[in-house]
Image (cartoon, rainbow, N blue to C red):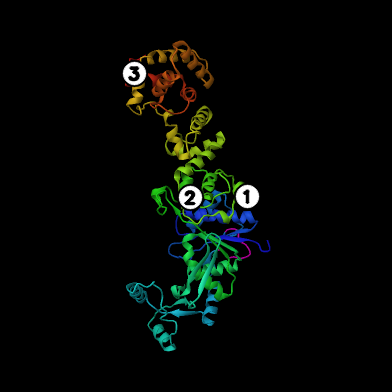
Amino acid sequence: MDKEIRLRFAPSPTGPFHIGGARSALFNWLLARKTGGKLVLRIEDTDLERSSRESEENIMNALRWLGLNWDEGVDIGGNYGPYRQTERLNLYKQYTERLLAEGKAYYCYCTDEELEAERQELAARSQMPRYMGKCRSLTKEQTASYERAGRKPTVRFKVPAGRQIVVNDLVRGDVVFESDGIGDFVIVKSDGIPTYNYAVVIDDALMRITHVIRAEEHLSNTPRQCLVYDALGFARPVFGHISLILGKDRTKMSKRHGATSVEQYRRLGYSPKGIVNFLALLGWAPNSEQEIFTIEELVKAFSMEHVAKNPAVFDIDKLNWINQHYMRQMSEEEFFEAAKPHMIEKGCMTGQEDGEKLAWLKKVVYTSKEHVAYAAQIPSAVAMYFDDDFDFENEQASAVLTEESVPTVMKMLFEQLSHMESIDAANVKGVFKHIQKTTKLGGKSVFMPIRVALTGNQHGPELTEIIPLLGLERTIARIRRSLEKAGVMSL
C-alpha cells in the first residue's frame, strides 16, 4: 500500500465501557492488524461534566483485558499528540479563528429560548428543525448590542446552500445528504469548548487517520464533518459505519438483554477470548461456517467487505456457547484461578487453603468444567459438595428412592465402599459393575437412585467423580439421610 493505514478508537470517558464500544474497537483493531497499519487510542473528553479519568482508565483496562492493544495514545504517546481532546484546545482555537477570518463560520448570540422557539415553529410547519441563520449577517451594531447584554456567543459553521454531500461508505456504499437540510451547526460552544463534529475532524486530520470505522449512529454526523473537512482543506478519510446491535427481540440493546458493559462480563468470569470471538461475529460474517476463531484467525479472515449493513443481534445463548468452548480449553490450574474469586464470594472457600484442602477444592471445581458457560456459574455447579443437607429437586426424584431394588443396591454399595483402601474413580466404576452383575439390574436402576440419594438431582456430574470427592463417610451419611426423607427404611 502507498499510504500507511491509520485507524483510531476514540471513546468518550463518560461511563461504563459498553459492548457496542468494544465491538467498534475490535473492528478497528482487526483492520489495523490485518493491513499492518496503526491503531490510535484517543480520548474525547470535551463533555466536561460527565467525563472522568476513572472512566478513562476503565476503558483502557477493558481494552487491555480483551487483548486490544494500541500503537499511539494517551498513555504511550506518539507523534501526533496530545491524545486527549481537552489538551488540544489551542489547536482547535487556531482553526476556528481561520474559519471566522475566511467567512466560513460566524458568532451566534441566539439564546436557548430563541432556538427552542425556532424549532417549534419549524415543527409546526412540518419542516425539519434546523438553525435558520439568524446571526449569519449581523451588523456591528447588533453584535455590540448582544455583547453589552452579556450574551456569550457560540461559533456556527456556515453550511453552503444547495450542495449534495456524498459519503463513500465501506459498509453502506454511497450515502447522499442535502446540505439544505442541515442548517448552520455549532462548532464551538459558548464556553469555548469545541463540539464533537468539529473537534473530531481536526483530530482525525492532524493524526493522519485514513479510515474511520464507527457505529451506524454516527452516520448522521458525517455530512457535517465532511463539510468541515472540505472547508479546512483536509482530505476526507474512508468511512465505514457498522450496524447497530439489537437484542434478540430486535429492540435496541439494553440491560434486559444481558450485561451491557465489558466490566460486567469480566466480573462474571467470561473469557476475554470468548468475548472477542463473539463480538467479531456481531455484524461481520466469515467466508465459511467457522464460528470459533483464535485472534490470529480473526486477523487473517477479517475484511470490511463482509461487514453487514443489517443490525447485529446480541444472542446471549450464542455468547455462552462460544465462551463455554474457551472455558473447556483451560488447564485445571487456569480453570481454578477463574473460579477462585467466585468461590470466595459465595463462601465456598477463603482463598487461604493449602495442602489437602486446596487439592480437594481444585478437584471439586474441575468437575464443573463441562457444565458451565462462565466462571460465576461454578459455585452453583459445585454446591453439592459443600452442603450435605439438601432437598430433592422434585417428587419424581424422591420417587426413585422408593423403588423395590433400592435397599439392595445401597447395601451392596456400602459394603463394597467400606472394604476399599482408596476410593477413586476406577474403584467406584468397579463397584457399579459388581452391583449390576450381582443384581442383574440395568444401569439406570443402579445409577439413578445413587445419584438422587447423593445429590437430590436426577442429572449432574459422573458418580465416579462425586463419590471419591465426598469420601466414604459423607457418601454413606448422605444416602441414609436421603432414604429417610423419602420414607425408606434406614439402612
Residue picked out by circle 2: 262
Q: Earlier in the sequence, mark 3 or mark 2?
A: 2
Q: Number of marks in the image?
A: 3
Q: Where is residue 189 shown, x and y percent of the image?
A: 45, 73
33 vs 61, left or right, is: right
Helix, strand, or loop for circle 2? helix
Q: Earlier in the sequence, mark 2 or mark 1?
A: 2
Mark 1 is on which residue type? Lys
Mark number for residue 300? Answer: 1
- CA distance for labels 1 and 3: 60 Å
- CA distance for labels 3 and 2: 49 Å
Mark number for residue 35? Answer: none
Q: Could you tell me which residue is drawn at 34 percent across and 25 percent down?
A: 396
Rendered image quadrant of residue 303: bottom right
Quarter placement of the C terminus:
top left
Mark 2 is on which residue type? Val
Q: Could you tell me which residue is drawn at 55 percent across and 33 percent down?
A: 332
Mark 3 is on which residue type? Thr
Mark number for residue 402? Answer: 3
- CA distance for labels 2 and 1: 25 Å
Q: Main secondary structure of the magenta part?
A: loop
Position of 418 relative to 133 (above/below): above
Q: Between 265 and 31, which is closer to the camera in this rendering? A: 31
307 vs 15, left or right, is: right
Position of 361 relative to 446 (above/below): below
Start-end of magenta stretch: 75-83
> Can residue 38 be seen here?
yes
Quarter placement of the N terminus:
bottom right
Position of 487 relative to 114 (above/below): above
Q: Where is residue 226 shown, x and y percent of the image?
A: 53, 70
Q: Could you tell me which residue is drawn at 52 percent across and 55 percent down?
A: 308
